[in-house]
Image: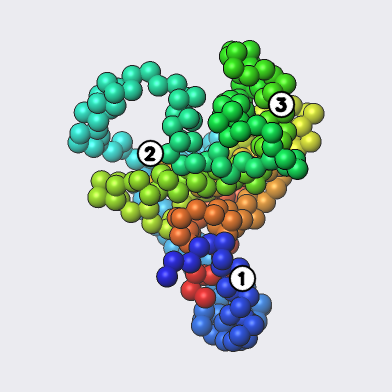
């Protein structure tokens, strides 16, 4: 039986109501005393830090610098050798699809996954047929996804005006539909992947944030204390360094730990029960522990 991540919170509530909190904690080998739990985590942290201090002087890949803002220097890994046959695969793809544009890629993805079915109108009725509506909807998604804007997309084609694209955008494009469409594309990518060549999808995904510059008129724009400059954060959950399974728009001062947990619980894809690897920039936020909800 495959349990999706979206069903885990309800499953936890049912188990707690059925067996009680002490039974759940005993199954997880955890104590109910908060002070004892914090002391256990602190002891483990101190042990790991002492082990780190003992091994750094003997580690040839790590150097402690005396000057500069960054005092710890790590020797980069040597580049991995190129997989056999990769050049031939790139050459074959280049011959079959030499100059494929993004609109064509988006259209093929819509035909293969049916992602346009996720966009439902917020009005009480729809006068346009699906065949007529799909084209302006694709143009809206292309303009928003590439940040080209609806005006530039409308100016580059005679199939739809700016007013038509704006109407479709206001009526059909919203956050819930976009998440459903992204989940369909991610599920289709995971389903078509050849496990013999590319390996199994697994349950692990990396998560981290990226800062994007934004104007002050954006209400979520803030000054970033680490990277400097005004902007917003996009927090990604990425599987196999290629497939994005969840993304969030955040303020620069928001908690990345909360964003990581939200992506684990709400990604709504067929990835399974993922364990996100969250890279924190600050040492005081670099260690946290999440209860193993998959074992409940």
- The first of marks 1 and 2 along the sequence is 1
- The first of marks 1 and 3 along the sequence is 1
Identify the residue at horizontal 24%, vertical 26% (top origin). Answer: 92
Depth check: give the residue in front, 160 or 174. 160
Q: Which mark is residue 166?
A: 3
Depth check: give the residue in front, 91 or 204. 91
SS for tag 2?
Answer: loop
Asked where in the image residue 12 lies, by quadrant, the reply is bottom right
Identify the residue at horizontal 33%, vertical 54% (top origin). Answer: 200
SS for tag 3?
Answer: helix
- Whether residues under marks 1 and 3 lie with C-beta atoms below 8 angstroms apart, the answer is no
Classed neighbour count for the residue bearing mark 2: other residues with Cα under 10 Å, few (<14), some (14–19), many (≥20): few
SS for tag 1?
Answer: helix
Q: Is residue 79 shown left or right of residue 24?
A: left
Above or below for 108 versus 265: above
- The first of marks 3 and 2 along the sequence is 2
Asked where in the image residue 121 lies, by quadrant, the reply is top right
Q: Nearer the viewer, mark 1 or mark 2?
A: 1
Cα distance, mark 1 to mark 2? 44 Å
The percent position of residue 289, horizontal first and vertical second, equals 56, 65
- Whether residues under marks 3 and 2 lie with C-beta atoms below 8 angstroms apart, the answer is no
Depth check: give the residue in front, 245 or 241. 245
Q: Nearer the viewer, mark 3 or mark 2?
A: 3
Identify the residue at horizontal 35%, vertical 46% (top origin). Answer: 192
Identify the residue at horizontal 29%, vertical 47% (top origin). Answer: 194
The percent position of residue 44, horizontal first and vertical second, equals 51, 70
Please count the marks in the image.
3
The percent position of residue 217, horizontal first and vertical second, equals 80, 29
The answer to whether residue 287 is seen in the rendering is: no
Q: Which mark is residue 10?
A: 1
């Amino acid at each position: 039986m495959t349990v999706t991540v979206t069903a885990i919170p309800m499953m936890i509530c049912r188990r707690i109501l059925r067996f009680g909190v002490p039974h759940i904690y005993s199954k997880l080998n955890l104590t109910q005393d908060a002070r004892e739990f914090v002391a256990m985590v602190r002891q483990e942290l101190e042990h790991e830090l002492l082990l780190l201090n003992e091994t750094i002087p003997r580690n040839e890949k790590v150097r402690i610098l005396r000057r500069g803002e960054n005092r710890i220097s790590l020797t980069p890994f040597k580049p991995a050798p190129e997989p056999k046959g990769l050049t031939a695969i790139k050459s074959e793809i280049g011959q079959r699809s030499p100059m494929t544009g993004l609109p064509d890629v988006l259209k093929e993805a819509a035909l293969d996954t049916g992602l346009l079915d996720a966009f439902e109108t917020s009005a009480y009725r729809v006068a346009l047929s699906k065949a007529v509506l799909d084209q302006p909807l694709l143009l809206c998604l292309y303009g928003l996804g590439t940040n080209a804007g609806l005006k530039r997309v409308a100016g580059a084609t005679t199939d739809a005006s700016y007013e038509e694209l704006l109407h479709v955008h206001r009526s059909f494009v919203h956050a819930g539909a976009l998440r459903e469409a992204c989940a369909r594309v991610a599920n289709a990518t995971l389903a078509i992947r050849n496990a013999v060549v590319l390996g199994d999808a697994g349950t692990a995904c990396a998560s981290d944030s990226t800062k994007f510059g934004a104007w002050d008129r954006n209400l979520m724009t803030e000054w970033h204390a680490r990277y400097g400059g005004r902007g917003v954060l996009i927090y990604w959950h990425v599987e196999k360094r290629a497939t994005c399974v969840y993304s969030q728009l955040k303020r620069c001062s928001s908690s990345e730990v909360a964003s990581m947990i939200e992506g684990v619980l709400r990604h709504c894809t067929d990835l399974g029960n993922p364990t996100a690897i969250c890279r924190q920039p600050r040492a005081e936020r670099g260690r946290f522990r999440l209860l193993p909800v998959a074992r409940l």
